[in-house]
């Protein structure tokens, strides 16, 4: 977990206003603790992902929500698929 | 490490703009978060990113062109990818199957994938599926064999015989206890993968068992009869006089019992001298004692250094 100041400090070239906007857009969903944002590892990785998509791959912020929506759906499917596969593989015993 | 110009598909004379365009084009295709589970794309992306890192900076590009650094000169530091989190439980944070996402909920997914796992409705004759289970059993039950009464989640129950000397990971097959067949097909089997919980002091090596046997100073020096646990209950064992830490004593036939073609194994007890609290008598004795043949127990260590 890391606060917003820590995240901006440790991420070279990360603009505080960009980050605020991404949170307002619900692209990043940090926890809130007494009015302060707290970022988990996955939130930090998602900030890096959004920067890579925008700055390195040239996907502008108008197109980003669609890319994120598709990515999130893809990961939903992958998690779900794994769960189904593991549910099938091993079932619990009840011991008498 | 391949030539970075080759990796990006550009020439040594390409402009910085050309290189950036080539990079964007390739990176979009191979970005690992857009290709989850595709290791080849990930490797390719790393190579592309490293090549771009090197060629996008006029200074490092110059150094590379002049042969001052090699193609691996500017390897990109790797940070955990978004996928590392999104693929696992933490990824639920950004799930789209929650409120506000109509037409996209987890039941929906279940329908899509669930149907892939169900048998098609057809009049074809088909064998019932095998059911897989995992079962934890105690170390000594695996050594001595046991019978366990088990109940499936579906409610059916039966006795499972765990054979003598069962090994970790062994799969037991209960014929005809799995899913029913269709249209006269054979009933499936139940497969049980055995996992053995480690024992507090026994270790298994094939048919033999090992244990560390704590003895007192005087039991080791003077010899003694001590009680030793075995898989079938404690037995008396004689410790010869002048034994030492590390001495290995064998109890023949007290390992894993005979089963199949295998004869019974042995139990090896490795002595470990435990000093315990020292009283004034021992203290006084050692102060007044000079050994006939002084030994240096660290001799071997000193030879190595």
Image (spheres, grey):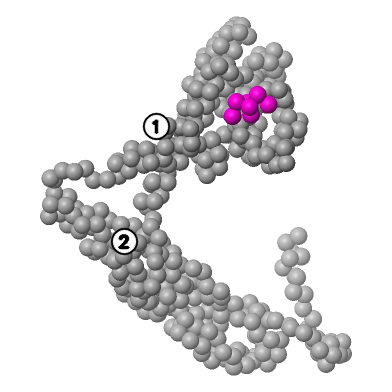
**Height in image: A9 above or below A59?**
below
Judging by the rendered image, the residue that carries numbered circle 1 is: B103
The kind of secondary structure the magenta stretch mainly shows is helix
| Picture quadrant of residue B179 | bottom left
Residue B41 versus residue B186: which sits nearer the camera? B186
- Residue B215 point in image, percent of width and height: 65, 85
Please tell me whether residue A25 belongs to the stretch shown in magenta: yes
Instruction: State the residue at coordinates (40%, 70%).
Output: A95
Give whichever of discs 1 and 2 has the lower sequence position. Answer: 1
Which chain is mark 1 on? Answer: B
| Location of the N terminus of chain B (image quadrant) | top right
| Picture quadrant of residue A78 | top left
> Which dot, 1 or 2, sits closer to the camera?
1
Instruction: State the residue at coordinates (59%, 93%).
Output: B225
Under tag 2, what secondary structure? Answer: loop
| Location of the C terminus of chain B (image quadrant) | bottom right
Judging by the rendered image, the residue that carries numbered circle 2 is: B154
* Left or right, residue B55 beside residue A77: right
- Residue A66 point in image, percent of width and height: 50, 22
- Residue A17 point in image, percent of width and height: 71, 22
Residue B93 versus residue A82: which sits nearer the camera? B93
Instruction: State the residue at coordinates (51%, 20%).
Output: B28
Q: Which mark is residue A90?
A: none
Residue stretch in magenta: A20-26
**Height in image: B99 above or below B15?**
below
Which chain is mark 2 on? Answer: B
Residue B181 versus residue B237: which sits nearer the camera? B181
Under tag 1, what secondary structure? Answer: loop
**Height in image: B296 above or below A40?**
below
């Amino acid at each position: 977990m890391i606060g917003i100041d820590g995240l901006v400090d440790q991420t070279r070239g990360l603009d505080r206003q960009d980050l605020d906007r991404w949170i307002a857009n619900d692209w990043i969903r940090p926890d809130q603790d007494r009015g302060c944002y707290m970022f988990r590892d996955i939130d930090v990785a998602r900030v890096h992902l959004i920067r890579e998509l925008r700055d390195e791959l040239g996907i502008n912020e108008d197109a980003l929500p669609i890319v994120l929506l598709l990515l999130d759906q893809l990961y939903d499917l992958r998690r779900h698929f794994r769960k189904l596969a593991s549910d099938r593989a091993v079932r619990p015993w009840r011991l008498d | 490490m391949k030539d970075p110009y080759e990796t990006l598909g550009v020439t040594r004379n390409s402009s910085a703009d050309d290189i950036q365009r080539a990079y964007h084009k390739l990176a979009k295709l191979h970005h690992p978060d857009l290709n989850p589970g595709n290791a080849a794309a990930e490797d390719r992306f790393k190579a592309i990113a490293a090549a771009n890192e090197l060629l996008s900076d006029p200074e490092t590009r110059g150094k590379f062109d002049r042969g001052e650094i090699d193609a691996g000169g500017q390897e990109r530091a790797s940070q955990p990818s978004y996928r590392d989190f999104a693929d696992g439980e933490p990824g639920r944070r950004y799930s789209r199957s929650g409120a506000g996402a109509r037409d996209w909920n987890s039941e929906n997914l279940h329908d899509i994938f669930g149907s892939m796992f169900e048998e098609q409705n057809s009049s074809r004759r088909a064998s019932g599926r095998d059911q897989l289970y995992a079962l934890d059993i105690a170390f000594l039950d695996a050594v001595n064999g046991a019978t366990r009464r088990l109940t499936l989640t579906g409610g059916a129950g039966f006795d499972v015989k765990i054979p003598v000397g069962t090994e970790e990971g062994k799969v037991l097959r209960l014929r005809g206890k799995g899913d029913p067949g269709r249209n006269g097909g054979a009933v499936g089997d139940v497969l049980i993968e055995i996992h053995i919980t480690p024992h507090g002091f026994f270790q298994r090596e094939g048919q033999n068992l090992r244990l560390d046997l704590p003895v007192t100073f005087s039991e080791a020096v003077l010899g003694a009869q001590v009680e030793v646990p075995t898989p079938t209950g404690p037995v008396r064992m004689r410790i010869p006089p002048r034994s030492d830490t590390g001495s290995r004593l064998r109890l023949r036939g007290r390992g894993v019992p005979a089963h199949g073609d295998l004869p019974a194994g042995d139990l090896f007890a490795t002595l470990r001298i435990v000093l315990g609290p020292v009283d004034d008598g021992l203290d006084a004795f050692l102060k007044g004692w000079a050994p006939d043949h002084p030994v240096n127990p660290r001799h071997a260590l000193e030879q190595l250094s």
